[in-house]
Amino acid sequence: MKATTTGLVVAGVGTLVSSLGAVRLKQKWGAGVLGFGLAHVVLGLLDLARPTIRHS
């Protein structure tokens, strides 16, 4: 998998998890799931911004 694809997949999964947490905010575990998803979105976007190193 390419480096850009990995970052996009992590951010995409984080978006799905965040939406699940936002829907379930009234329940006890909703805020935790929302925070977990948002952390994955941030980590995925940071992975996209990271410079790549080419080995020759």
Image: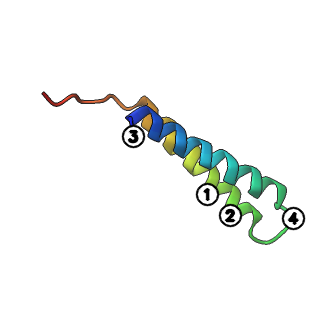
What's the mark number on residue 26? Answer: 4
Tell me the residue that label 3 is attached to: 1
What residue appears at the point 70 percent right and 56 percent down from the top-left corner? Answer: 34
Q: Residue at x 66, y 45 (%)?
A: 15
Which residue lies under the disc numbered 1? 36
Which kind of residue does numbered mark 4 sit on? Lys
Is residue 43 shown above or below 35? above
Q: CA distance from mark 2 to mark 1?
A: 6 Å
Q: Are marks 3 and 2 in contact (CB under 8 Å)?
A: no
Secondary element at tag 3: loop
Image coordinates of residue 5 in percent, x first then y, are 46, 36
Choose the circle earlier in sequence order: 1 or 4. Answer: 4
Q: Position of residue 30 (x, y in %)?
A: 76, 63
Do callouts 1 and 4 mark residues in contact (Cβ within 8 Å)?
no
Question: Which quadrant of the figure has residue 24?
Answer: bottom right
Q: Is residue 23 left or right of residue 1?
A: right
Q: From the viewer's side, name the closer residue of 12 and 29.
A: 12
